[in-house]
Image (cartoon, rainbow, N blue to C red):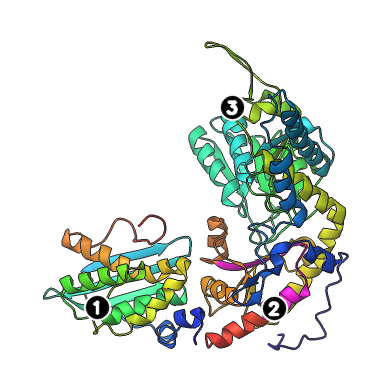
Amino acid sequence: MSSPLDDMYRDIIMDHYRSPRGKQPVEKADIKSDGSNPACGDELEMQVDVTDGALKQIHVDCKGCAISVASGSMLAEIVKGRPLEEARRIAELVRRMLKGEDIELPDDLGDIDALKGVRQFPVRIKCALLSWVTLIEGLENYEKGQGVGEKPATTEGKE
Amino acid sequence: MPTNTNNRPAAVTKARTPLDMHRVKADFPILEEMINGHRLVYLDNAATSQKPRVVINAVLDYYRRKNANIHRGIHFLAEKATAAYENTRARVARFIGGVDPEEVIFTRGTTEGINLLAYSWAEANIHEGDEIVISEMEHHANLVPWVIMAQKKKAVLKRIPITICGHLDLSNIDDIITPKTKLLAITHMSNVLGTVNPLAELAAIAHRQGAVVLGDGAQAAPHMAVDVKALGVDFYAFSSHKMLGPTGVGVLYGRRELLEAMPPFNMGGEMIREVRFDRITWNEVPHKFEAGTPDIANVVAFEAALTYLEDLGMDKIREHEIALTRYAIARLTEIEGLEIQGPQEAEQRGGAISFTDPNVHPHDISTFLDSKGIAIRAGHHCAQPLMRILGKTATARASLYIYNDESDIDALVEALTDMRRYFGV
């Protein structure tokens, strides 16, 4: 039987943490969205190249704990290439899953199931959420015609 | 460089404590709790301390045998409760070096004591162009009120910088504390660096320039003998819950003449002498500053905490913590690459030891240690400006108290070593 600790720090998570995906810069940054959890000290920088209504390339640079880094890395892997609408829908699903809703996630979401273990550690959920909320805000601002949000996204306090 | 090994090298000598550790540990029921299948190793004392049985029982005893509202009731229990409440005040007055009990104001904690000072004393005494001096190592509790007050009054907020070793840099102190300085508000012991500041020396410098001095004693009062008169401070604030007492209780000491000249902070019952619709006169100090029903039960139980500390002896507690801090720093230094903040010499600091691992984030450290029953703190420790100066977004912090011993430090070091294996770094 695995411990709650092992459920959270699964091999997949640690692999993403040690070699995060999405580090390479994008050619054109149509969406720029930053995330910040000042209480943790986590900082996240996200840039997206939107071409033909899809996320052609995504750059995620997260300075933070294993969970926030791994979550951002998974995000980069999962949403790359998807249409804006679909990326938005997936991000919302993951957000609700992390917040404790019993949600069936689509099968094609790569390693995302590995993040479920975080839910046993209430204070760490915000770490896993940061990149997804940063993406949601970035997409919202893009729809409104703003390339970049006024304030960085955060999952601390009232969200 | 020391090598990373599980065997204790000869260089790290055992911590010699003057306390009877077996007896002390037995006085704290929570230490019998199992956490995630391990014995509790509680190293988060700078956040709050655990409570000995005598304090827990004092709360129960108050509600079972003494409960009534204080000061105004004319019946047996009201007199008993009032006597118990005022008994704690007298006890606090002795504990901080023998001041007049009327110079002891009960608050909800250090934060409220400092806010009282900001909204009462500073509101009346700080004017445009005046200077308020703090240091770079302040907790937000002794920082935010002064940032706000300085903005409100168009006063100038000045900072005493820190050296690379985590001490206050006093080399330019005469440029910082000047005749324009109205207030020096400074921590007696840093909650991040552990540094014990030369409060008496600073108070003397500030007084020469005519400034008033506030000592933030939240971290110092629990761990060393404090004599506010010897320190020469005008105000000194601290919290019960960090020194074995209940939460919800703090103390603001103030020199009588300053307190008497200050307007009240909260308005309501108890703080008045006579009320008419058009004219109100204030009660005497300290009651002028204690509007409404205070946390009577917890004030009463705080007396049991102070008695417990004095029975052990504050000087012995300090000696115990110096020995254990020295041991902890030596053992943590064995872990290669671990960076310890603040002074490395135990005599110059308290037992709040902040550290970072180059490869594991403080929150991951804290979660991993928790799985081994070890409680530490991770984050910015309510000192964000200091964190920026240190170049860290967060640190892990182990902080010691009377019931900690070498076995707790050994458990911490062993777990940190396991952690690196676990995270493969």
Reply yes or no: does residue B399 show up in magenta. Answer: yes
Reply yes or no: does residue B408 show up in magenta. Answer: yes
| Left or right: residue B175 compared with residue B371 | right
Q: How far from the left and from the top, in percent, is residue B366?
A: 56, 72
Cα gap from disc 3 to disc 2, whole angstroms:
51 Å
Q: How far from the left and from the top, in percent, is residue A52?
A: 11, 76
Q: Nearer the viewer, mark 1 or mark 2?
A: 2
Looking at this view, is B306 or A103 the one in front?
Answer: A103
Q: Identify the subunit bearing mark 2.
A: B
- The quadrant holding residue B23 is bottom right
Q: Which of marks 3 and 1 is in front?
A: 1
Say the numbered circle drawn on residue B124: 3
Task: Kindly identify which residue carries mark 1.
Answer: A79
Decide which of tag 3 and tag 2 comes sooner along the chain: 3
Boundaries of the magenta span: B395-413
The 10 Å Cα crowd at callout 1, few under 14, some 14 to 19, many 20 or more, is many
Mark 1 vs mark 2: same chain?
no
Cα gap from disc 3 to disc 1, whole angstroms:
58 Å
The 10 Å Cα crowd at callout 3, few under 14, some 14 to 19, many 20 or more, is few
Relative to B229, is A93 above or below?
A: below
Amino acid on which disc 2 is placed: Ala
Instruction: Check the picture and name the quadrant holding the C terminus of chain B.
Output: bottom right
